[in-house]
Amino acid sequence: MKNNQLKLQPNRRAFISTLAASAASIGLASLAPLQTEALELSDVNKEPKSADEWFDTMKGKHRIVFDVPEPNEIMPFAWPRVFLMTNQKTGSSEKDCNVAVILRHNAIPYAFESKLWEKYKFGEVFKANDPATKAPATRNPFWQPKKGDFKIPGIGEVSIGINELQESGVLFFVCDAAITVFSAVIADGMKMEAAEVKKDWLASLLPNVHVVPSGVWAVGRAQEHGCAYCFAG
């Protein structure tokens, strides 16, 4: 990759295009740093439970994991709510249900505060549009949405904000492997230190979003703990 292709100025559009292409084309060679200290998890994930122990809390009769590797409009957040709503209609309360949402690969931006979306151009890099504007998002549209932001035809207003789903007991996990790789790619494009960018990202995790070694690790653990699998991305 040529250095002049990665400059933010004067051609910002070229930078975003190159950065997105670089992120999309990451190969196995890019994962080499993960074999060393790069997979150390953030301290925020170590209290009050380890990654494995979060899955031990899933004791409900009805358990499901939503696998989210890509932005997919409202679906990664609508489907967990639909699962809870329809279980309630068939006699199972939220306490009878356990839901895990795994944000991995290109869906990891949803684990972070809006300030990172603007700073690192997440909407453009990860091709995540804002449901309100249909343009690349400059905020996390699913964190603390306003009342009435999301409506489903035939159903009406739905509470599918991450914070709203968390209030219903939904657990959110994000892939540390993807955080490590994508923060390094973006750091390279912005001429920043990879460790500092990753530190910035981890400091801006949404409350109660748990970092796990990898998304595929978490998908596997969830199923080992009795969760049915649903592809949501």
Image: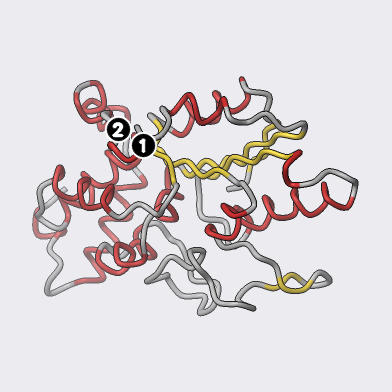
Residue that label 1 marks: 45
Residue 197 coordinates in the image, percent (x, y): 19, 50
Q: Nearer the viewer, mark 1 or mark 2?
A: 1
- Observer-nearest of 198 and 72: 198
At horizontal 34% and vertical 34% (from top left) the residue drawn is 177
Residue 39 coordinates in the image, percent (x, y): 28, 29
Per the rendering, the mark at residue 201 is none
Q: Percent x, y for residue 60?
A: 72, 33
Query: Which residue, as the protein is rendered here, is positioned at the far front?
Result: 48
Is label 2 in a helix, a strand or a loop? Answer: loop
The mark total stands at 2
Q: Residue at x 63, y 25 (%)?
A: 223
141 or 191, nearer to the observer:
141
**In the picture provided, is 27 more to the left or to the right than 4?**
right
Kind of residue at badge 1? Asn
**Badge 1, how many Cα within 10 Å: few under 14, some, many 20+?**
some
Residue furthest out toward the right: 90
At x 63%, y 37%, the residue is 65
Label 1: which secondary element: helix
Which amino acid type is shown beneath numbered disc 2? Answer: Leu
Picture quadrant of residue 229: top right
Give the distance between the C-alpha atoms of the residues marked 1 and 2, in whole angstroms.
7 Å
- Give the side of residue 108 with respect to residue 79, left or right: left
Q: Would you name the residue on which mark 2 appears? A: 41
Q: Residue at x 54, y 78 (%)?
A: 132
* Vertical comparison of 133 with 73: above or below: below
Contact flag, marks 1 and 2 (Cβ < 8 Å): yes
106 or 154, nearer to the observer: 154
Residue 132 vs 127, above or below: the answer is below
